Amino acid sequence: HPYSDSPTSRSEKSRMEKAEQRKRTRLLIEALDPLVPVFSRTCTAEKGSLRSKRTLLQLQEDTVFFLKRITRKKATRHDYVDCDVMREGMLSSSFIILVELDVTTGEIIQCSNGLSRWYQLHPSEIIGQNFAHFLDTNDVHRFKNFLRLSASKTTAKGIRVKLLTFGSKCYEQLECTVKAVQDPVNGRSVFLLSFDEEAPKNPDCFPLWSPCLLRGMSGIFRFDESQSSGPPTDVDGQMRKLSRKGNAELGWCQIGVSSLLKTESARAMLDRLGGENRQASSISSAFMRLVMKMVEMHLTFDFNSHDVPFVAMHARLKLPRVLGSLRTPWVEVLHTSLDGAPVEGFLTLAGTQLRFFAHRNSAPGSLHVTGAHYRQEEGVWKCYHTRTWIITPNKSRIYGQIFRDLDDKPYQFEQTFVR
């Protein structure tokens, strides 16, 4: 078992790490307290134990207030804390969670060590990633407006969002508050993030979900266009727009149909329906919509030998009764663990990956998974698209937004498959 440390060693390691973290926090507070000015408070305000007579919370509030007031200054004989020095010091903090963003695109420019701890198990460095890809789909538009207000130097109150975190193997979508702490400089601004809980110290195994719960999600599903925003082929077309020049990647729908073509009976059935034009890259949208009405998808959810959840997806064609009710053999479309490992052989272009992350805090009676597309840019794996996958015993929903960055107009979609 990959997490089979003894309870004693785990406890001792945790105790030592907590002691080291407390030491680093104490040193940071001792360094910040004399640097950050004490701002006026009511005479009834609580007195703290710091040398400045502030509480830890008051020091944090004064630090945020001070950052908002900082502007670039010319050299002077008077003592003051330089803006760049202050910002770099804050970004080196493991206690305060800060991120510097491009307020137009949402790209992460810098982040504090405190935020890095929440992304210690992300597949690659988070610098250069787009912050919006870690947000819940329903929060992307609100966050875009929040950044727009920040970019225009209009006072923007904090915003509450759900953020996918990678602080341990138990990937979690957690609520956090984001506040601007600096006016934009050259299109960049620093934001303070506040989570309701501490970042995990060690990678954890997945929670003890009941195997019966996962197996209860398994079954045969069919695409329901009446509950969807449109056919899957439309989503495939939008995804191709994100492809690099000359390298059009097939979408999930087209990859599934390509898998069906591996069997002679499926090829014969598609010939019967649409003639000899069977290349997945050239099949018409109308024909693909017809095929999708005949596709049955079998999902199997369970745990592997390492207690990590996995999904196996198979597909087949089933003709309607008026055409003979013929069925083709099941064909495997994908088989992958839900711990962020790259899906083998799904995306066909070199330098691209698809990863699935199961959420530890999925809603009761459901499984919440994030599917993330990555591609290699200058030696770094960068996420260029995420979509949400919610599975219940009766329904499978896949939804998301497709955009290059926050300056783009997003394409929203939802695909529903029912039992």
Image: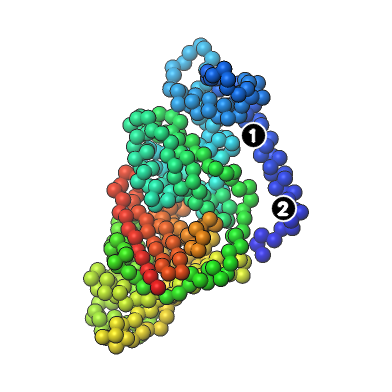
Say which element carries label 1. helix
Render colour scheme:
rainbow
Looking at the image, the residue that sits furthest to the right is: 8
Q: Which quarter of the rendered picture does the C terminus lie within? A: bottom left
- Rendered location of residue 103, percent (x, y): 38, 37
Q: Residue at x 51, y 11 (%)?
A: 77
Q: In this view of the protein, can residue 279 be seen by the observer? A: no
| Nearer to us in this view, 350 or 54 | 54
Q: Residue at x 37, y 76 (%)?
A: 296
Q: In this view of the protein, can residue 170 be seen by the observer? A: yes
Mark sitting on residue 10: 2
Q: CA distance from mark 2 to mark 1?
A: 22 Å
Q: Is residue 213 above or below residue 146?
A: below
Looking at the image, the residue that sits furthest to the bottom is: 324
Q: Which residue is mark 1?
A: 25
Q: Is 113 placed left or right of 332 in the picture?
A: right
Q: Label 1 sits on what residue type?
A: Thr
Q: Is residue 17 above or below residue 320?
A: above
Q: Label 2 sits on what residue type?
A: Arg
How many C-alpha atoms fall within 10 Å of the one at disc 2: few (<14), some, or many (≥20)? few
Indicate the quadrant where residue 160 lies: top left
Q: Is residue 2 above or below residue 28?
A: below
Say which element carries label 2. helix
| Nearer to us in this view, 366 or 191 | 366
Q: Is 93 placed left or right of 265 in the picture?
A: right
